[in-house]
């Protein structure tokens, strides 16, 4: 019998489940047998189990308190360097990630039109068989490259990539081009490393450009920054908006959006033309020492003042203060650095400032390129080589974007290729732990790309917007119900293990990918019998049993031998302030100024950024976080609002070239007069999210697609909007994209 899950069904299920949860009896799972076997739970299913959080990608260690087979409390694991005994509000709310009344607990197959929200329950065998048969049908008709694969950064990312590469498709979409492509590409070209580690132990001066650390996901680094400020380190913070980080800074500079690199280039000008750099370090370890003065000569503080609006004497003073701190100065690399098409140049300037201070790899210095790759020191199941692929990637990497690493890609560019069918037509999309309909700019374009798909399958724990528009939904177990591969951090390999049994029929990604691979005929790439066998294979070089790791929460890793030499993984083996690679690709070899576009007189820069209560687009349905979240509003400078006849709390219509959204106004002094701000992650389309549906407006509806030609980063702040008062209240939800019967 076919069962449709309409909005009414979801609401009924949600209400019943919420009542059961309040009564303490929502889908009571058995105590995790693995934890019982390890001696972590008593006969009643009570005890404390070490694992790892997944409410963001920082992956703090946690201790789960289990009573009567239910998780009743989560605390930070003092043995884990990311948590140090603490969990942030999102980590504490991870209980509701598992016990969300809207959890998808059985495989679902679409029975209505795509976007209508009608699904029927299916067995795992049927859902996996259907997924594999559709993927193989597309491969046979159009080639493996006609399948697109996308996922977010997670501990099972390698296994997801195994399916993609073994299947034979080059088309990979990650979230990185929406986040930190500019930073990673700049530091790869300058230092030969993706992201340098930061050391706050001896820091005296911190320059931070738009990195709202106090509301960010890197909780342990936030703590280290706070302690540094407490002991007297100076934080200078550049951001058009007065964030919580700005409130902790010694100086907040509300710089014009897109002008950061002009400010930084002027700092470099002051430092190199006045011989304020660590000259011995620069001469010994950098390429470009002999030419940087001439290259930076035109970027005077007076020049930068006209662009940034920051007084020249302020820029010069900050440059001199930064230089005076020597290797105890830190120009923070940032994280979500994809703001403008010139963000790569901003990151190149940041990388250069750090080199000039001599803070890299120096004892007591603030920046380190000695970063351990995830998985190093651990074994993995054997597998054959991947088949050769000759098809071009649809996102333009590397044939259109030659300097973008393949594993980063240019996610937002996939859709134009899908819509136009050039250089060839994509027909299927396999998605795991990702929500491209919410995350990608210009949501209407994403929906148009989905309409081109013959088949879409999604792996997730809830019915997010992407799952709502999928043909098959494969329910993953929550992070409290499953194993993931081990994660090395600071000399230890930490475990994520089930603290309760999976609810319903939810399964781990390790299980899902293995089962799907066998149906696709690529099982040789998944040579493990089950999740525990996978981890035992990882542990083999360490000589530690899985049972020991379950109990302690981690395994000791062997210390890496270091030869004491300072080397950089660049063509020259040095820090490349001057880059031949960039020159040969047709770009400036030096950090340089590139003028970004600016809004018209009646327009505003549309800013977006993190809030402390949520993680990107994935937690808005969490009832605990929702309870303590502010109503999402559009920030506008209070004086500008008054001049336009707008009052705090008014409904306003926000329009860009690609979309329209209605939202309440927050009139505030905490933002520049030429900017407005929206928190991301609201305005969900899925009626399967009974908490998040209809809440707030989506910034993705408004964002236009602009791609940096060097790093491939999406310029999220390069969208300009108009704002006017409206009496309409919330914007009408877009009509569903109905496709197929």
Image (cartoon, helix red, strand yellow):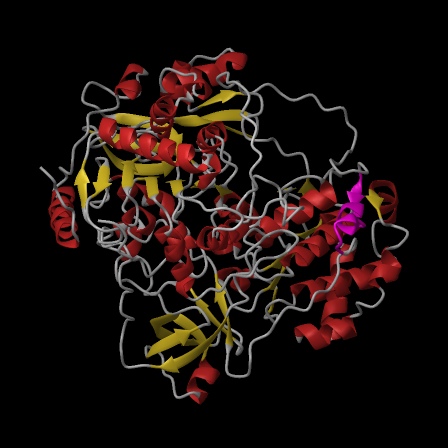
| Residue 594 in view, yes or no | yes
Residue 15 is left or right of residue 705, and the answer is left
- Height in image: 451 above or below 361? below
Q: Residue 171, percent across and down?
A: 50, 40
Is residue 583 covered in magenta?
yes
Whether 472 is drawn above or below 353: the answer is above
Q: With 46 as the anchor, is 610 left or right in this view?
A: right
Kindly indicate the quadrant of the structure image that contains residue 652. Answer: bottom left
Q: Quadrant of the N terminus?
A: top left
Query: Can residue 366 be seen at all in this image of the molecule?
Result: no
Query: Which region is colored magenta?
Result: 574-587
Which residue ends up furthest to the right in the rendered image?
Answer: 290
Left/right of residue 585 with respect to residue 421 in the rendered view: right
Give the quadrant of residue 519. top left
Position in image of residue 283 (x %, y %) = 88, 45
| Rendered location of residue 586, percent (x, y) | 76, 54
Of the pair 697 and 59, the residue shown nearer to us: 697
The stretch drawn in magenta includes residue 103 = no
């Amino acid at each position: 019998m076919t069962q449709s899950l309409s909005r009414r069904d979801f609401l009924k299920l949600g209400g019943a489940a919420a009542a059961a949860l309040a009564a303490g009896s929502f889908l009571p799972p058995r105590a995790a047998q693995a934890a019982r076997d390890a001696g972590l739970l008593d006969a009643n299913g009570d005890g404390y189990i070490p694992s790892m959080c997944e409410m963001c990608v920082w992956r703090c260690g946690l201790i789960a308190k289990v009573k009567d087979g239910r998780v009743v409390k989560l605390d930070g694991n003092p043995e884990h360097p990311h948590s140090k005994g603490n969990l942030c509000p999102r980590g504490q709310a991870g209980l509701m990630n598992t016990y969300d009344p809207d959890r998808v607990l059985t495989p679902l197959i679409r029975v209505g039109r795509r976007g209508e929200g009608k699904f029927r329950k299916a067995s795992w065998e049927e859902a996996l068989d259907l997924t594999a048969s559709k993927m193989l049908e597309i491969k046979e008709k159009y080639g493996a490259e006609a399948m697109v694969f996308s996922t977010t950064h997670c501990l099972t990312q390698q296994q997801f990539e195994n399916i993609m590469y073994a299947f034979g498709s080059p088309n990979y979409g990650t979230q990185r081009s929406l986040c930190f492509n500019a930073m990673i590409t700049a530091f790869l070209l300058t230092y030969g490393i993706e992201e340098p580690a930061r050391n706050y132990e001896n820091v005296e001066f911190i320059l931070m450009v738009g990195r709202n650390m106090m509301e960010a996901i890197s909780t342990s680094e936030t703590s280290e920054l706070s302690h540094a400020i407490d002991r007297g380190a100076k934080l200078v913070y550049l951001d058009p908006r007065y964030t919580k980080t700005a409130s902790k800074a010694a100086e907040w500079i509300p710089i014009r959006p897109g002008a950061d690199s002009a400010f930084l280039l002027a700092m470099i000008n002051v430092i190199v033309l006045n011989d304020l750099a660590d000259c011995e370090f620069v001469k010994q370890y950098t390429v470009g020492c002999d030419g940087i003065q001439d290259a930076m000569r035109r970027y005077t503080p007076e020049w930068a003042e006209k662009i940034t609006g920051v007084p020249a004497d302020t820029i010069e003073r900050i440059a001199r203060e930064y230089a005076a701190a020597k290797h105890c100065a830190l120009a923070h690399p940032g994280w979500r650095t994809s703001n403008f098409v010139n963000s790569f140049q901003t990151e190149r300037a940041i990388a250069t400032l750090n080199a000039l201070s001599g803070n890299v790899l120096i004892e007591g210095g603030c920046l380190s390129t000695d970063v351990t790759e995830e998985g190093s020191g651990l074994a993995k199941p054997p597998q054959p080589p991947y088949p050769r692929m000759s098809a071009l990637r649809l996102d333009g990497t590397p044939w259109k974007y030659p300097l973008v690493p393949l594993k980063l890609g240019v996610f937002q560019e996939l859709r134009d290729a899908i819509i136009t069918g050039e250089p060839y037509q994509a027909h299927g999309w396999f998605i795991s732990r990702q929500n491209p309909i919410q995350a990608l700019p210009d949501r209407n374009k994403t929906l148009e790309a989905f309409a081109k798909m013959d088949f879409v399958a999604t792996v997730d724990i809830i019915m997010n917007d992407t799952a709502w528009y999928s043909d098959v939904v494969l329910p993953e177990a929550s992070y409290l119900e499953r194993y993931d591969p081990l994660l090395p951090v600071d000399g230890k390999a930490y475990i994520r293990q089930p603290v309760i049994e999976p609810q319903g029929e939810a399964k781990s990604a390790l299980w899902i990918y293995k089962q799907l691979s066998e149906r696709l005929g690529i099982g040789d790439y998944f040579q493990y019998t089950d999740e525990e066998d996978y981890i035992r294979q990882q542990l083999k070089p360490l000589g530690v049993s899985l049972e020991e790791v379950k109990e302690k929460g981690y395994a000791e890793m062997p210390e890496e031998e270091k030869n004491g030499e300072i080397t950089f993984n660049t063509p020259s083996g040095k820090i490349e302030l001057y880059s031949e690679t960039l020159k040969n690709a047709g770009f400036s070899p030096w950090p340089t100024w590139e003028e970004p576009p600016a809004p018209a007189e009646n327009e505003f820069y549309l800013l977006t950024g993190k809030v402390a209560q949520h993680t990107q687009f994935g937690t808005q349905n969490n009832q605990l976080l929702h309870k303590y979240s502010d109503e999402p509003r559009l920030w506008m400078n209070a004086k500008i609002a008054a001049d336009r006849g707008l009052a705090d709390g008014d409904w306003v219509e926000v329009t860009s070239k690609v979309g329209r959204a209605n939202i309440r106004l927050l009139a505030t002094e905490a933002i520049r007069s030429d900017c407005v701000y929206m928190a991301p992650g609201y305005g969900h389309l899925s009626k399967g999210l009974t908490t998040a549906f209809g809440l707030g407006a989506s910034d993705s509806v408004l964002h236009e697609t602009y791609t940096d030609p060097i790093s491939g980063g999406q310029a999220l702040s390069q969208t300009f909007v108009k704002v006017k008062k409206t009496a309409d209240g919330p914007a009408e939800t877009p009509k569903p994209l109905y496709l197929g019967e």
